[in-house]
Amino acid sequence: MATRVIANLVIGADGCTTLDGRSRGLSSAEDRTRFHTLRSQADLLLIGANTARHEPYRSTPLPLVVVTHGQMPEEVCANPRAHVRSGDLSQIIHELDGVVLIEAGPQLLKKALEQKLVDEVFITQTNVVSGENCIDINSFFSGYKESAREAIGEEVFFTFVRALA
């Protein structure tokens, strides 16, 4: 089976990716529905150590790969589906099989986007402002093109695909 890499990220209107240190404060019912739909299409989840420390990954419905140069963050040690991988992100992803869903924060996701490792990215932009870890959506997705946009209430749902060289 070939590897397909998709990613999901929720951001605020000002590009913030966390509110009080977590993404949940940015999310809505519609965003969570879309998030679970994406998870249902995946074979495994990929996150970084920072996400593992700040988001609830003690239990996951799918195998979980935590990319870190250290030990498994304590917050996910109880998850029997979690495995630590260290090294080059490109090599790690190329060694995985099936549909990989990156649920990482902006640091790891940006690295994957810059290396053109992600096939498709799903973004929810909410009306929340004044969070932390802000990104500029235009520069963040350099090398990717917007393929879909849907506004529902005050939220906008974007899909970006890797641009052909």
Image (spheres, helix red, strand yellow):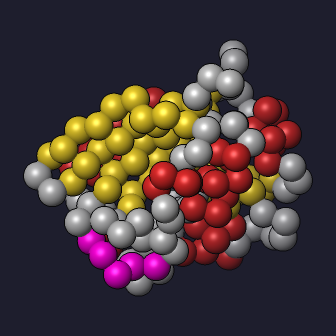
For the point 68% across and 24% down, which residue is it? Answer: 165
Quarter of the rendering occupied by the N terminus: top right
For the point 68% across and 76% down, which residue is it? Answer: 74
| Residue 157 spot, x, y in % from top left | 30, 44
For the point 40% across and 29% down, which residue is it? Answer: 147
Location of residue 24 by image quarter: bottom left
Q: Which residues are magenta?
A: 128-132
Q: Tally the marks.
A: 0
Q: Is residue 53 above or below residue 13?
A: below
For the point 70% across and 72% down, which residue is it? Answer: 73
| Residue 3 spot, x, y in % from top left | 68, 25
Left or right position of 162 against 25: right
Of the pair 157 and 78, the residue shown nearer to us: 157
**Residue most toward the right?**
87
Q: Is residue 3 above or below residue 144?
A: above
| Residue 20 spot, x, y in % from top left | 41, 83
**Residue most toward the top?**
1
Of the pair 121 and 47, the residue shown nearer to us: 121
